[in-house]
Amino acid sequence: MRIHSAEFVVGAVGEKGSPTDGLPEVAFAGRSNVGKSCLINRLVQRRRLAQTSSTPGRTQQLNYYRVNDRLYLVDLPGYGYVRGGVDLRRNLGRLIETYLANREALQAVVLLIDARHGPTELDLQMVDTLKSGGRPFLLVLTKADKLSRGKLERQIARLEEEGQLADLPYLPFSSETGLGRGDLLQWVGEVTAVEAAPAP
């Protein structure tokens, strides 16, 4: 899949404000500060399409990015620590759960996990949620550039041995170097059936 165009469309706080054109959607989920916005920027090769921040919980809505006028990439709020307190964290959790359970246009989910640390308890809970949801999902091990090649290989081997990757599809990714970009684009194209969008 090749990217010809990408634009921010809307930040929605639920179904009411979300796009209604029925284009397929791929959602990006993960803990706060795991790198969702950076990954989307690298994926579409636009530095500032998705706003990034070092403050956990900056994304507090469903951010829709239309790609090639054929599909949406949806940046979900991060789960886990959020600057803003328990009530905000609870509200964002409900927003994510409702979207994943009820959004008809949602075709697949990319779950981001920090490659340096492996999945947390919250990540494993999200894996269980995605398994029960029945849609395709892919684990993406972000910040792979923070580890040497040898350390990355040993980390992946350890996670496989401990069963935390347990027959789940995954790939390492770096927003800095572009590692994994081609594989992730191919997966997105396959799960949305828009592998080859024509150039304008």
Image (cartoon, rainbow, N blue to C red):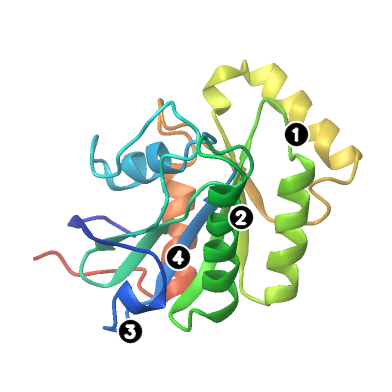
Where disc 3 sits, the SS reads: loop
Please identify, in this view, whether the residue under mark 4 or under mark 2 is nearer the observer. 2
User: Is any atom of residue 31 visible in this view?
Assistant: yes
Please identify, in this view, whether the residue under mark 1 or under mark 3 is nearer the observer. 3
Q: Quadrant of residue 52?
A: top left
Residue 92 x %, y % = 53, 56
Q: In which quarter of the image is residue 102?
A: bottom right
Q: What residue type is labelled 2?
A: Arg
Please identify, in this view, whether the residue under mark 2 or under mark 1 is nearer the observer. 2
The C terminus appears in which quarter of the rendering? bottom left
Residue of label 1: 156
The N terminus appears in which quarter of the rendering? bottom left
Question: Which residue is drawn at the image coordinates 65% and 31% (left, top)?
Answer: 115
Mark 4 and mark 1: span between their CA atoms?
25 Å
Relative height, residue 177 to residue 195 (above, below) = above
On residue 22, the disc is 3
- Which of the two labelled residues, at mark 2 and mark 1, occupies the earlier sequence position? 2
Where disc 2 sits, the SS reads: helix
